[in-house]
Amino acid sequence: MSIAMLTLASLSLASCFGVGSNRNFVIENSDIKYEKSPTTIRSKIDIDGYWCHPINGEDKCTGIMFWEDGTFAWSVNIVRDSLGHIEDFVTLYYGVYKISGDTIEANYYWEYSYLNIWSITKVKFLILNRNCIKQIYSHTQNGKNKHDRPSYSYKIYNYVPLDTIPPADNKYNVWRKYDWLWRDSLSDASP
């Protein structure tokens, strides 16, 4: 009896917080697909480094990296040793992008693994020149929050060249393995 009551209480509590997979919502709203072929981004902006938006005027920044294959990283953290050499690149979110004229449109994905809730964030950047882009749109959706609203904040990102950048298929870019993200995929494979 107590196990049944505990199970019922857990399910009720989980439904109050909206816990449960919303994977299908994210898949259905993924309007940009991974092409697995080179894009034209290198002709528009520099990509052998990262894009930095300063945080509160400090030396730290929110970093973005673009790769020629149509993938990108959001919230890049570059780990350096005591001499300033790059030891590792840690990135929180990965996604895909496409170029439409002078605009980079992108989706990045994230998951609250302990709650099994996925989210998709759609962002747009206006290309000002080869070394400067401006974020003009951002909208995070997970299908659970009915009151989410797009943001039209205008953040400037400046290009910072690097001697070394990680490959697009680095160990942190786990989203590339999901074939629902690929342009030529007809399946809706589970992650």
Image (spheres, grey):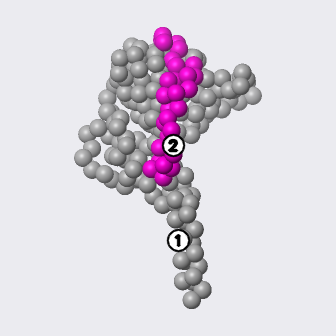
Q: Position of residue 106 (x, y in %)?
A: 43, 31
Could you say which is closer to the camera, residue 72 or residue 157? 157
Q: CA distance from mark 2 to mark 1?
A: 25 Å
The residue identified by callout 1 is 11
User: Is 157 left or right of 124, judged from the image as shown?
Assistant: right
Sequence-earlier tag: 2 or 1? 1
Residue at screen point 41% across, 27% down: 105
Q: Position of residue 78 (x, y in %)?
A: 63, 30
Residue at screen point 61% across, 29% down: 62
Magenta region, residue range:
128-157
Quarter of the figure that contains the N terminus: bottom right
Q: Position of residue 46 (x, y in %)?
A: 48, 16
User: Is 158 left or right of 123, judged from the image as shown?
Assistant: right
Whether the magenta-drawn stretch holds residue 131 is answered as: yes
Q: Secondary structure at mark 2?
A: loop
Q: Say if 94 sits above or below 142 in the image.
A: above
Q: Secondary structure at mark 1?
A: helix
